Image: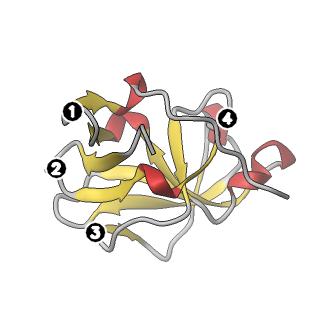
Amino acid sequence: PEECAVFHCRGCWTVLGDSLQLCGQEPPGLSILVCFKVTSDVTWEDSLLVGLEGALLGCAYYLLSCRLCGLAVGFILYSSGSDLAYLRGLFCFFKDSIICYILKNQMIIEASKVNFPAVTLKE
């Protein structure tokens, strides 16, 4: 794969995941990377949060955090409207909370500036 990348926590550079686990496109209004798997340095609480504004309005989700520094790095959607249903149970990283290390060029790039090849979930 040409565009392999490792995802790091913006706060402490801990490895959180990689682009081989990408499995879906980001929905309008959310700047996220959607993954099947993450490393053991990604943690979440048992308590659900409810979105009060924006694209997650009315959605219930678990907040993902970096185990080492505690930075909120994303969410796991628990319940949502039909428009976001395909994200339920997946790991969604906030692009502004992670940094990408691109293996081919050995470059560090803001996640929001990386265009990964399109991947979609099969229903």
Q: Residue at x 67, y 28 (%)?
A: 28
Q: Earlier in the sequence, mark 3 or mark 1?
A: 3
Q: Earlier in the sequence, mark 3 or mark 2?
A: 2
Q: Decide: marks 3, 2 in contact (CB < 8 A)?
A: no
Q: Secondary structure at mark 1?
A: strand
Q: Amino acid at mark 2?
A: Trp
Name the residue beneath numbered marker 3. 41
Q: Earlier in the sequence, mark 2 or mark 1?
A: 2
Q: Residue at x 41, y 28 (%)?
A: 114
Which label is found at residue 108? Answer: 1
| Whole-percent x, y for residue 85 in the image | 78, 53
- Image position of 11 (left or right of 34): left
Few, some or many residues within 10 Å of mark 2 (<14, 14–19, 20+): some
Q: Secondary structure at mark 2?
A: loop
Q: Amino acid at mark 4?
A: Pro
Name the residue beneath numbered marker 4. 27
Which label is found at residue 13? Answer: 2
Q: Residue at x 51, y 72 (%)?
A: 47
Q: Earlier in the sequence, mark 4 or mark 2?
A: 2
Q: Residue at x 36, y 50 (%)?
A: 73
- Image position of 88 (left or right of 30): right
Residue 26, by quadrant, is top right
Few, some or many residues within 10 Å of mark 1 (<14, 14–19, 20+): some
- In the rendered view, how is the structure colored? secondary structure
Q: Amino acid at mark 1?
A: Ile
| Whole-percent x, y for residue 34 in the image | 55, 49
